[in-house]
Amino acid sequence: MEEITIIGYSGSYLSLIFESLTALNYEGKVKIIINETEKRAVAPFESNIPYAEIFYTEIKQTPVKGFIFCSNKPSTKKFLNNFYQDLWKINRNEFSDLVHPSSVVSSTVTTGFGLQIEPLSVIAPYTKIGFGVNIGRNCSIGHHNIIGDFSSIYLGSNIAGHVEIGKGTTIGPGCTIFSNVKIGSNTIIGGGSVVTKDISSNVLAFGNPCQIVKNLS
């Protein structure tokens, strides 16, 4: 990829993106597109890869291809996607997958573009991953799983086989999900939970065993 366009701004997440780019020996151009009039307080990041920070109102020519979300929060990814789709008419296939080279992805895994995988994670065969999915550090994703668009799986989670995770769902750090479990869309599974049975859409659930504690709709 000759040029990467990062949409959104989070110093802490930019550090993860640039870590992967550095490990991949990326030598192209990087633009960070900011859609706010003022940047919020963010964690600092450092990079030896040259980059430019540009407000979207200053863009004179619409970027093409190489888009990366600068967030692992489902609602933020949805917002950024809708904002820039309306602004620039970009397509999902113009987003890049960014996989740290220390992670292992089976050749039979299919993705819907915009996948980001942090270091030391493993994705087993025949898993289907939707658009704009984030998988954190040291995760294990089993075989024949389905992970919906914009979902995020945080660090240290272990997901067995034949699991289905709906769109826009968050799997918190250190979760364990047993085989054949279905988790609905826009649901939050709290960190450290052990999910042994199906969890519906639009809920907050956590614990061992994982239980629904709040309706989010």
Image: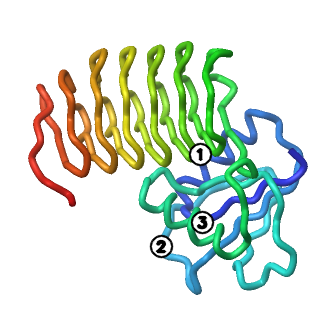
Residue on which disc 3 sits? 8
Q: Residue 22 placed where, x, y %?
A: 75, 40
Residue on which disc 2 sits? 41
Instruction: State the quadrant of the C terminus.
Output: bottom left
Give the colouring mode of the picture: rainbow
Kindly indicate whether the residue at mark 2 contacts the one at mark 1 (C-beta within 8 angstroms).
no
Answer with mark 3 or mark 2, whichever residue precedes in sequence.
Answer: 3
Mark 3: secondary structure: loop
Answer with mark 1 or mark 2, whichever residue precedes in sequence.
Answer: 1
Marks 1 and 2, Cα distance to the nearest angstrom?
A: 17 Å
Within 10 Å of disc 2 (Cα), the crowding (few <14, some 14-19, many 20+) is few
Answer with mark 1 or mark 3, whichever residue precedes in sequence.
Answer: 3
Where on the picture, by quarter, is residue 105?
Answer: top right
Left or right relative to 80: residue 57: right
The residue nearer to you, when weighing 60 against 27, is 60
Amino acid tagged 3: Gly
Left or right relative to 11: residue 199: left
Which residue is drawn at the image coordinates 60% and 50% (left, top)? 15
Badge nearest the viewer, 3 or 2: 3
Q: Residue 19 placed where, x, y %?
A: 66, 42
* 77 w.r.t. 2: above or below: below
Amino acid tagged 2: Ala
Q: Residue 56 placed where, x, y %?
A: 70, 78
Disc number placed over residue 205 in the picture, else none: none
Residue on which disc 1 sits? 16
Q: Residue 91 placed where, x, y %?
A: 71, 56
Mark 2: secondary structure: loop
Amino acid tagged 1: Leu
